[in-house]
Each structure stands twice: as C-alpha cells, then as structure tokens.
Amino acid sequence: MKSAEVRRKYIEFFKKRGHVEIPSAPLVPENDPTTLFTSSGMQPLIPYLLGQPHPLGKRLVNSQKSFRSQDIEEVGNNRHTTFFEMLGNWSLGDYFKKEQLPWIFEFLTKELELPKGKLYVSVFEGTGDIPRDEESVRIWKNLDVPDERIFFYGVNKNWWSRSGEPEHMPPGEPGGPDSEVFYDFGEELKLHEKSPWKNEKCHPNCDCGRFMEIANSVFMQYQKQADGTLKELTQKNVDFGGGLERMVAATEDTSDVFTTDLFTSMYRYIEVLSGKRYGENQEETRAMRIIMDHIRAAVMMMADGVLPSNKMQGYVLRRLIRRALFYGRTLGLLKDWNYIGQLVEPIAQIYGNAYPEVVTKAGEITLLLDEEAMRFGRSLDKGLAEIEKLPKLDGKIAFQLYETYGFPWEMTEEIVRRNGQQINRAQFEAEFEKHKAVSRTAAAGMFKGGLADYSEETTKLHTAHHLLLASLQKVVDPNIKQRGSNITAERLRMDFNFARKLSDEEIKKVEVLVNQTIKENLSVTRVEMDCTDAEKIGAQMEFGHKYPDRVSIYFVGPQDKFFSAEFCGGPHVEHTGILGHFKIIKEESAGMGIRRIYAILEVA
Ligand code: GLY
C-alpha cells in the first residue's frame, strides 16, 4: 500500500470514531524548552494529557512529523530512521483500553488487511505498585490473539514516556504502561546465518530483524512526582503512536522500510547519480540508506525553519548533512558536493501534499544544502591537511577531528588506513562517551528547569516571555517575531528576527515597559477561539504554520485592549503582578538576522 493511502485510511478511521484531526506541529517544538525536537505525536499535547481541556475536544488524531536524534548511529539497517511520521490518536480522559485495542486491531487487520496470523502483541508485566495489565490480555484474547502470541515485558520495553522507564522520568512527566503490536516477517529472517541473534531464543522485542513494532498504545495515566513516586493522573488517557514508514512496510510484507514508496524515488536518483544499485552491495546499500534518511530529515527540518549552525537544532542538522556527504564517498560521489541538493526534488514530490512547506521552501533548501556541502568540502580539505601534519594519529585526535571538522569516525579511519597507520577505536569511543555524558547532563538540565516540571519559576518566566515579545514589538519593531525559545527555572531565552544589535537605550526601554506591565498587575487569561478570529485580532502566531480550527490564546490584559495575545498551550501565572523585577542580562547574535535575549526575574 502507498504511504498516502495508509495515512489517509488511519485518519479517516479515527475521524469516523469521533476524533478531530489536528495538524502536525512543527519539528521544533513551540513553547517547550525541554527538548530540541518534536519526537512523538504526544509531545505538543502534554498540557492536555495533564488535564487542560483541549479546544477541539477529547478525541484527537493526526500524523506528526517527528525526529529522534538518539537513533542517528543506528541508521543504515532496514528499519531505523531519524525522521519519521507518527500516526497518533488520543483519548484525553475519554475512552480507554477496551475501545483502543479493538480499534487498532481492526485498523491493522481490516483497513490495512494485515493477516491476523502475522501479528504478535506485548503487554506490561507489572512493577512495584503498578500491576500486570490483565485487562489488555483479556481484550487481546477476546480478539482471538492466542496465548502464544501474547508476550509480557517489564518497564524497559512496555512502559512509555518521553524519557523512558519510570526512574528516568523527570518530575511532572506523564507516562504509563503500553501494549504494542508487532509484525512477523518470518522465521527465515531470524535464521539468516549472519544474524547475531541466530542462536538465541527469538521473541517479538528481540531486534533480530524478524519482528517489527508497528503500533504502540500507551495508557498514559501516571505522572512522576518530585519525591520519585508515580501518581495517578486525574484523567486516564490513551496515547497511540505508530510509525507510518513501518506500517507501510508491513502492508508490503517487506522488512526494509527504504523500499517503500517514501524512499524509492530518492534511491533511484542516487542510483542514477552514483551508478550503483540499491540492494546489490551491503556497504553501498547502507550508505544509500544513511544518505536518504539524513537528507530527508535535513529537508524536513529546514522546511520548519532550522538552519545549519554549531548549536542546538542547527548542530544536529549540520551533523546529518555531513554524515550524508561522507557516506556519499562510499558510492563514489567524491567531488560533486552539491549532489545532495538534487535530492530535495524527490523529497518535495513525496511530501508536498501532506506538508506543503517542503514545496514552498524547496528552492531555498536546495541553496542552503549546496552551501553547507561546499563549506564541508573546504573543512574536509583543512582537516586532511591537519592529518598530514600529524606524526601519529590516536583515538583522542580522531575525536578532535570529529568535533572540529565534523569528521565522522569512519572517515578518519578510512584516511588513516590508507596511510598505513593504526588507530585506536576504543580511545575514540571513550572520548565520545565522555562527550555524550556531558550532553546528557545538559539535556537533564533542560528537563529540570523546563516546562515539564511546571515549577512556579518556569511558569513565571514563561509569562515574562510573552511580555518581552510584545514589548520588543512595541519599542523596537512591530515586525519582530519569535524564532525560538528556551525557558528554564533560572532564566528565559528568546530568539527573534532582527538585523542588528539592539542599542543600550532600546534594551532599557524594553525592560521599563515589561516592568510597567508587571506593576499594572494585568490579568493573564486563556481563551479558546476560532483560528481565523485569533488571526483577525493579531494574536502572535508562527508565519506559515498550520494551526487547528480552534486554538487557545493567552491574553495579557483585557481582551478588548490587550497588551499581548499569543497562541500558546500554557502554563502561565494568573496576574503579572507576581512576576517580580524583569531584567535583560544579555543580547547577542544567534545567526544571520537573528538576535537572542537572555532575561531573568529578580525579587522586586
Ligand atoms: N507516544 C507513543 C510512542 O511514541 O510510541
């Protein structure tokens, strides 16, 4: 089945069961500083899973653009991708297990026509105070799934939250047990003589290649508490996620997602450019998959406004492009750095209907990719010259080359072999691990201070963020728009479009206006309204971003004479008076045409 058909069937199936379709949120989350990318459909819905009423009701469905950077090293096999589309349906305190599991089973077996005999399911086996999920077992059995195809797993496999098992969840984070469906591609895959699992007992979650998870119903009913315990949420939610790529692969009975229609026009292009054939040679096929995955992810990110840089999302984007270029060498694409720009067209063709921004920005994205590729070409020359000068290369230097010039390990290794030198991979990996530990700590820091904990400090800074944006528009330039935000319990950070440095006088005036608004103790109210009405009154919204028909707007001040009106999921304080004293601590460049402000709230 074609991907567009699977996507359409899924949305229609749930619409017929009372769900309202919501648009995909952008890949870079809005008003959620806890994470760099939208990595699942539930992420933009956190406030609603925690109990805030959603303007469109209790049953929602969509296909969400998602990106998971932790999967980057795994790309190259037949199923892992960094970017993917997640089909999702949600019950916000409405239906629960006895509706969800039969619906998903019906969708898979009737709409997608997957043979029942090829489906396996998994269920939560219980932990501590949280019991084994007997109710789901009963439901699966009623659906004629036999005992031998029902498997039990613990928190490492059948518990879902954005940060994994309960002990890794930060305070405030919702999560719960889940029940997954796996597609069986057949015994022969497991028995493949090269499989590292060929002598082990096979089970749906063993990753040998025989089974692929295609559907995950999360029963999101718990929230992590500051004391480390899990508390039942006031409402029991369903959060379903199923990878579109994987569902399409199952309908075609192929274990290789890269042979579905989402990729075929891309690899045909690469075949023409390189003269190599997909599937013929293992190394070359791996290289093609990496290029396809990374460039698709890069294009989708750029369509959502991410630019290559050395920080945050921009750094991830740069890394994707560089890795793709490096793997082009395996295919003999050595000199024509701009070949990756030519992949934008097949990607725009596949995604144009579902995500028109890819088509409207295709020209711009191609230019950016070409420029980035040329830059890396130069960086590669510099790095190679550096290597020439070194008497001996070790793993530590290989890591520095990776950090400084973006040389992936494989690339340094290849160059050094050619020189007849030996290089220590363990040392490189040790450095890499150290680096990962630092990034994990940074990520944990983001969680700690982010909106996920809904702490009082973060909430106050979130409201101050709205005041800052409105003040910048009133004092400096009405065309200023927010281009990124990050709020911790200590400070807020806002990126916005503006061509030059702000003067000291402008900064002072902005501070004065924010503090005046705080003194006036204006009310902060959340109002649900039609998107078109929100546009008419001039509420702050992202240009070119698709919003649902009903949206939630936060007003500072009276609705008919507001100081600020912004599309936002909250949370916010009720009155500005409690914010304290607002102070800008830094103003700097954050890229071409983008400025960045850091600000804090002090006790008044
Ligand atoms: N939110 C469910 C999933 O990502 O599988």
Image: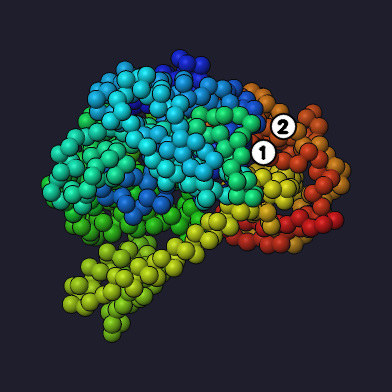
Which class describes the residues within 10 Å of circle 1: few (<14), some (14-19), or many (20+)?
some
Instruction: Locate the C terminus and report the quarter of the image it occupies.
Output: bottom right
**Disc 1 secondary structure class:** loop
Classify residue 181 as left or right of residue 593.
Answer: left
Q: State left or right for residue 488 relative to residue 3.
A: right
Side (left or right) of 366 relative to 233: left
Rendered location of residue 554, percent (x, y): 71, 35
Q: Amino acid at mark 1?
A: Gly
Pick the front one: 38 or 198:
198
Q: Residue at x 33, y 55 (%)?
A: 73
Queried on whether the Cβ of the residue with tag 1 lies below 8 angstroms from ligand 1, the answer reads no
The answer to whether residue 202 is visible is yes
Q: CA distance from mark 2 to mark 1?
A: 8 Å
Image quarter of residue 542: top right
Q: Residues within 10 Å of mark 2 (few under 14, many from 20)?
A: some
Residue placed at 86% from the left, 47% from the top? 519
Residue 346 seen in this snapshot: no
Question: Is the Cβ of the residue at disc 2 closer than 8 Å to that at disc 1?
Answer: yes
The residue under label 2 is 526
Write the residue at 19% across / 42% down.
190
**Residue reaching furthest to the right:** 520
Dividing the picture into quadrants, the one containing residue 360 is: top left
In the picture, the disc for residue 570 is: 1
- Of mark 2 and mark 1, the one earlier in the sequence is 2
Q: Which amino acid type corresponds to the residue marked 2 in the rendered image?
A: Arg
- Against 266, residue 495 (above or below) is below
Where is the N terminus found, in terms of image quarters?
Answer: top left
- Residue 229 versus residue 122 in the image, above or below: below
Q: Residue at x 39, y 40 (%)?
A: 153
